[in-house]
Image: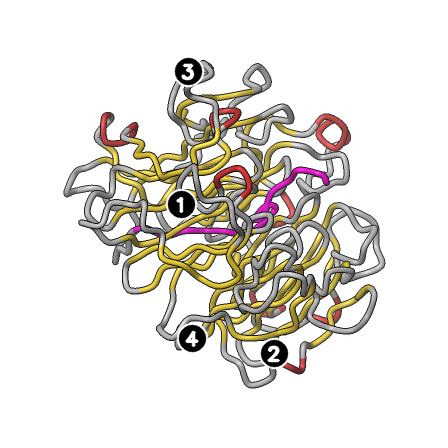
Amino acid sequence: MIRFTNQLLYSARVVGTTNKSPLICSLYSWGSAPNGQLGLGRNITEQYTPKLVEFDDGCQVFDTDRLDSGSFHAILAKDKKIYSWGHNRFGQLGHRNTDKQVDGCFTPTAIDFFNGKDIVASACGSYHTVVSVKDGEKGYSTYSFGWADRGQLGHTGSGVIQEIPFLKDKKVVAISCGFDYTVVVTESDGIYTFGANDKGQCGTTSSAVQQPIRVHALDGVKADEVSCGWGHTLLKTTDGELISWGANFHGQCGQGGPLKHHIAPIGKVLLDRPVSSPSSGSCASSCIVDGQVYIWGSSGDGKLGLGETFKDDLAQPTLLTTLPTNTKYTSTSFGYDHCIALSDTNHSIFFGWGFGQHGTLGHGSHTQSDLKVFSSPSVNRYFENINQSISTIHCSLDTSFAIVYPNTTNNTK
């Protein structure tokens, strides 16, 4: 199996704070970067503690900016601009410059095509990118670019930026991309999927979906968040219900039942209370319920965080009892095999567990004791030590990102 992200792989944006006015922030990254996906320059291939990402054009980061990443590339979406960096073999960075098309970008670089357009939603798949915009009187348009072999771009074009005709004039609420498929949530026109469907990831009976298809089983569902993993999807409705479908080899869809049911149809995740911050990993999932972290799916590489002796997969959500019980949690973000949770008590720390190789949990040196499987959550106080609070955490394939702001009371745009 190829190791990639979601968020993955995937779209797993996590918000730890909400502010009326945008906060002036900084972007940090850590983990693996053989293709420049951390945005830290050509000479850094692994980063074991959080490190500041610098923008060559002096771009200012705010807490309202949205970050997402694929297997080996990442994007930062602002109100009227998008930056991308990392691997670009398939054109997933959206740059028309020939040199960048070949080499990729090792630091954040603005995508000229989107300059001045209102960015509505955006997401990265493994090697593709999808962006929805509102372009003045032209209305709403959704574009895709990158790897196209499995229909995940929603059009028949090559990897260059191209509009998805079927989504023209549809107001998009959320987008998430898996390894080779895409899910688009619209405000009033339904939920659409396209791409590979060999694991049921498009929620239909077709073997592949070459252009957006409305998932009629979800007609009438109002959703505001979606998170795609390697081959499964979590969809949160506006009233906090969680729906899932797709690959279920390890119970990652959370619908219960025997794990031998490898493909799960569209159905409810077994939770009886409203959820927030759903996040899909490679073959595990997480969410927040009443301020506590729930986890389910594969226990491999410590992904469930339930301790060294816990080896079973979980087919339904289970309380993560190994986290400190004297606090509540605001959000989670799954990478491929690691997960991070933010505390509501102390916004300067985070808890991480799972696959710690390449520095994904940001604990420090490259010694054997730091680069290991963390079978239980471990606290990281890096940002507390530099007097910063965390606004957003995002995890991907062996990489992690954080948007942070100084612990001061006068820090607004």
Front residue of this view, candidates 288 and 256:
256
Circle 1: residue type:
Leu
C-alpha gap between disc 4 and disc 3: 42 Å
Is the residue marked by circle 2 packed among few (<14), some (14-19), or many (20+) residues within 10 Å?
many
Residue at the far bottom: name it. Answer: 220
Instruction: Look at 67% across and 62% down and name the residue there.
Output: 260
Asked if residue 257 shows in the view, the reply is yes
Does 8 lie within the magenta span? yes
Residue that carries the numbered disc 3 in the rendered image: 365
Q: Are marks 4 and 1 in contact (CB under 8 Å)?
A: no
Residue 69 position by quadrant: top right
Does 301 lie within the magenta span? no
Rendered image: mark on residue 306: 1
Instruction: Look at 62% across and 74% down and name the residue there.
Output: 266
Q: Which of pointers 2 and 4 lies earlier in the amino acid sequence?
A: 2
C-alpha gap between disc 1 and disc 2: 37 Å
Closest to the camera, between mark 3 and mark 2, is 3
Residue 391 position by quadrant: top left
Residue that carries the numbered disc 4 in the rendered image: 238
Q: Find numbered disc 1 in the image and state the secondary structure of the residue it sits on.
A: loop
Residues shaded magenta: 1-16
Looking at the picture, does residue 400 appear above or below residue 177? above
Q: Which of pointers 1 and 3 lies earlier in the amino acid sequence?
A: 1
Residue that carries the numbered disc 2 in the rendered image: 190
Q: Find numbered disc 4 in the image and state the secondary structure of the residue it sits on.
A: loop
Circle 4: residue type:
Thr
Q: Are marks 2 and 4 in contact (CB under 8 Å)?
A: no
Instruction: Look at 49% across and 47% down and name the residue there.
Output: 334
C-alpha gap between disc 1 and disc 3: 25 Å
